[in-house]
């Protein structure tokens, strides 16, 4: 896939900038990367602290023919981030994926993904926003209760790792997982995600749904399968918010 790269210094949110590049005849992917964000967005309406040194990027994908929002792309991106992060840390076994698409090192969050979709003239454009913490200041600057759950690549691997190296690696790996998804379907994506998820066969809670059960990994639709007291339940990720343009 060809990525047109747009590198900026400070933006509100790279997802918002990516959205402004949507046009009906888009036939390639655009990646927007920024040094800093003043209004970085996280999942579930949260904010994403965005100091300099970390990776903030958004991929705007060309529309596909099927005209539907595809939540499975969030797992394509998660696999690519998982591999990217693994390549920059000393202890690869310490890296895991948490439902739906957080990447953790030793159980602490190093990366998050925000998938958004926009309907323009009945074509669906997907934007995958990815934040990867590179520098340790990220952890030092946040309140202690948050710092306990957050980490950065420099705390687990070479201090010389740069944002651009992380971006290059991510784009290569995304390209490869995306091609696999388009050619071979969701099976290989799901298999990889499940084999690196941190909670397979463990008790998990989904507070936003008031659900509790044993996690069985994701199914073919990208839903998390939980074994609960009332039987098996498949939970949708609230991942993609669809808006119109
Ligand atoms: C999460 O809550 O885990 C998702 C965080 C996603 C943050 C990234 S940083 C680049 C892109 N631009 C944004 O405003 N958000 C995403």
Image (cartoon, helix red, strand yellow):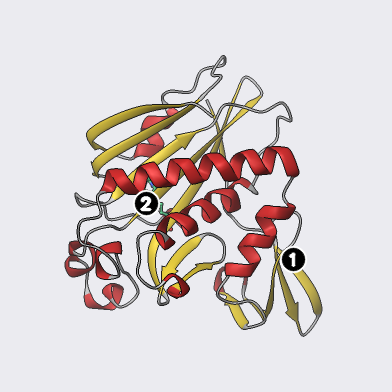
Measured from the top left, where is residue 80 in percent x and y? 51, 51
Going by the image, does 117 lie left or right of 47?
Answer: right
Residue lying at 60% horizontally and 41% vertically, measured from the top left? 178
Is 88 located above or below residue 229 in the figure?
A: above
Q: Is residue 40 visible?
A: no
Per the rendering, the mark at residue 131 is 2
**Element under disc 2:** strand
Residue 28 in percent (x, y) is at 52, 23
Specify whether tag 1 is near ligand 1 (CB below 8 Å): no
- The front one of 213 and 167 is 167
Residue 165 visible in this rendered orientation of the protein: yes
237 on left or right of 142? right
Dot placed on the residue nearer the N-terminal end, 2 or 1:
2
Question: Going 43% across and 69% down the picture, which residue do you hit?
Answer: 104
| Mark 2 within 8 Å of ligand 1, using the beta carbon | yes
Determine the secondary structure under disc 1: strand
Which residue is the site of mark 1? 234
* Residue at image coords 30%, 78%: 148
Cβ–Cβ under 8 Å for marks 2 and 1 = no
Q: In the image, is residue 220 above or below residue 169?
A: below
Residue 159 in percent (x, y) is at: 20, 61
For disc 2, the neighbor class at 10 Å (few under 14, some 14 to 19, many from 20) is: many
User: Between tags 2 and 1, which lies in front?
Assistant: 2
């Amino acid at each position: 896939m060809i990525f047109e790269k747009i590198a900026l210094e400070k933006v509100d949110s790279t997802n918002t900038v990516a959205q402004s590049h949507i046009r009906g005849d888009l036939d390639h992917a655009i990646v927007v990367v920024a040094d800093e964000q003043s209004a970085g967005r996280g999942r579930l309406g949260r904010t994403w602290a965005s100091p300099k040194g970390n990776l903030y990027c958004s991929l705007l994908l060309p529309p596909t023919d099927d005209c539907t929002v595809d939540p499975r792309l969030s797992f394509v991106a998660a696999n690519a981030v998982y591999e990217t992060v693994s390549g920059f840390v000393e202890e690869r076994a310490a890296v895991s994926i948490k439902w739906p698409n957080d990447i953790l090192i030793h159980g602490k969050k190093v990366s998050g993904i925000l998938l958004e979709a926009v309907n323009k003239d009945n074509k669906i454009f997907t934007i995958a926003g990815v934040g990867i913490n590179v520098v340790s200041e990220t952890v030092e600057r946040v309140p202690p209760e948050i710092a306990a759950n957050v980490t950065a690549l420099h705390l687990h691997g070479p201090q010389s790792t740069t944002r651009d190296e992380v971006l290059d690696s991510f784009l290569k790996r995304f390209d490869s997982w995306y091609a696999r998804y388009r050619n071979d379907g969701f099976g290989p994506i799901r298999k990889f995600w499940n084999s690196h998820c941190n909670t397979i066969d463990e008790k998990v809670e989904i507070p936003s749904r008031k659900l509790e059960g044993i996690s069985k990994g994701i199914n073919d639709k990208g839903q998390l399968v939980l074994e609960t007291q009332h039987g098996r339940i498949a939970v949708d990720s609230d991942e993609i918010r669809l808006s119109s343009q």
